[in-house]
Image: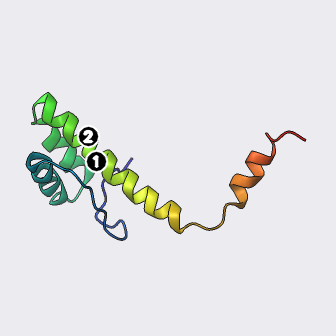
Amino acid sequence: MMLFNKKMSGSVTLHGLTEEQCQLLDTMWHFETEEEIMDWKSELCLQQRQVADSLLLCVLLEHLDKFASKTEDYNDAREVLQKYTLR
């Protein structure tokens, strides 16, 4: 599963990052494949690896949030939810 993809449309902004977190993101951004990221993470200490994982998830969630905010067609979700409404 690809968690980090330069081809994701748009940019994201993460606020309140430390200098170390910014450096980790800058390093991650230079990799072309998930395999390169995984190899790099395996060389990190446990604490840095956990921070890198958290940052990857933050980037992914920000992209998903932007995608979801652009989606206007919720018909499938409404159909599923209607099955659980009281009548």
Q: Quadrant of the C terminus?
A: top right
* Residue at 25 percent of width and 46 percent of height: 55
Q: Nearer the viewer, residue 33 or 62?
A: 62
* Residue at 74 percent of width and 46 percent of height: 81
Q: Position of residue 48 (x, y in %)?
A: 13, 36
Q: Secondary structure at mark 1?
A: helix
Q: Secondary structure at mark 2?
A: helix
Identify the amino acid type marked 2: Asp
Q: CA distance from mark 2 to mark 1?
A: 5 Å
Circle 1 residue: 56
Identify the amino acid type marked 1: Leu
Structural crowding at the residue carrying mark 2, measured as other residues with C-alpha within 10 Å and reported as few (<14), some (14–19) or many (≥20): few
Image quadrant in which you'd find residue 39: top left
* Residue at 51 percent of width and 64 percent of height: 69
Image quadrant in which you'd find residue 10: bottom left
Describe the colour scheme in one phrase: rainbow
- Left or right of 47 in this view: 2: right
Above or below, 62 relative to 1 = below
Q: Residue furthest right?
A: 87
Structural crowding at the residue carrying mark 1, measured as other residues with C-alpha within 10 Å and reported as few (<14), some (14–19) or many (≥20): some
Contact, mark 2 vs mark 1 (Cβ under 8 Å):
yes
Image quadrant in which you'd find residue 30: bottom left
Q: Nearer the viewer, residue 14 or 47?
A: 14
Q: Position of residue 71 (x, y in %)?
A: 57, 66
Q: Position of residue 3 (x, y in %)?
A: 34, 50
Circle 2 residue: 53
